[in-house]
Image: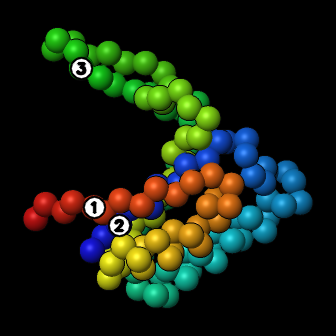
């Protein structure tokens, strides 16, 4: 079963670019990605551009509304994701706990509904 691990964190939380901690932090993502690839569970994943680059679209009464920014004004924003093909939720949670931002933010794990 596929699970999407949604990575939520405040953009200013955790190691920041230009600090001594940032290099090891990014390396931990490289290491995690390699681990799930080696385990054969990685389907895909990417980081997202900063929240300031987002645009939200909604349609009300047949009219499109477009606003700059994310859907919700919250402290933690969606920063990236992994899609993992795991045998069960327990395995997906095991890997989610290893995602580096689990130490600073939250990882939401949701089953993927696949339409064939």
Name the spot of residue 111 as percent of width and height, x first: 30, 63
Q: Earlier in the sequence, mark 3 or mark 1?
A: 3
Q: Nearer the viewer, mark 3 or mark 1?
A: 1
Dividing the picture into quadrants, the one containing residue 11 is top right
Q: Residues within 10 Å of mark 3 (few under 14, many from 20)?
A: few
**What colour scheme has been applied to the protein in the rendered image?**
rainbow
Question: In the displayed image of the protein, which residue is found farthest to the right?
Answer: 20
Query: Residue 16: percent from the left, percent from the top?
Result: 78, 50
- In the rendered picture of this protein, how many numbered marks are placed on residues? 3
- For label 1, the SS is loop
Asked whether disc 3 touches disc 2, contact meaning CB atoms under 8 Å apart, the reply is no
Q: Which residue is mark 2?
A: 3
Give 31 or 77, whichever is nearer the viewer: 77
**Near-viewer residue (46 or 39):** 39
Quadrant of the snapshot with the N terminus: bottom left
Name the side, left or right, on which 89 lies relative to 39.
Answer: left
- Vertical side of 55 occupied by 32: above or below: below
Q: Give the residue number, with chain letter if any, for mark 1.
A: 112
Whole-number angstrom distance, CA of label 3 to CA of label 1 = 25 Å
Which circle marks residue 59 in the picture? 3
2 displayed left or right of 28? left
- Looking at the rendered image, the quarter that the C terminus falls into is bottom left
Residue placed furthest toward the front: 90
Q: CA distance from mark 1 to mark 2?
A: 5 Å
Residue 110 to residue 66: above or below: below
- The image shows residue 90 at horizontal and vertical percentages of 41, 77
Q: Residue at x 71, y 71 (%)?
A: 27
């Amino acid at each position: 079963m596929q699970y999407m691990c949604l990575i939520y964190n405040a953009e200013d939380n955790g190691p920041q670019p230009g600090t001594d901690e940032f290099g090891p932090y990014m390396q931990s993502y490289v290491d995690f990605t390699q681990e799930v690839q080696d385990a054969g569970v990685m389907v895909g994943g990417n980081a997202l551009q900063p929240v300031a680059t987002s645009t939200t679209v909604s349609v009300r009464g047949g009219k499109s509304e477009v606003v700059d920014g994310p859907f919700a004004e919250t402290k933690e924003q969606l920063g990236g994701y992994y899609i993992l093909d795991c045998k069960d939720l327990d395995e997906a949670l095991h890997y989610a706990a290893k995602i580096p931002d689990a130490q600073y933010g939250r990882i939401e794990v949701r089953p993927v509904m696949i339409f064939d």
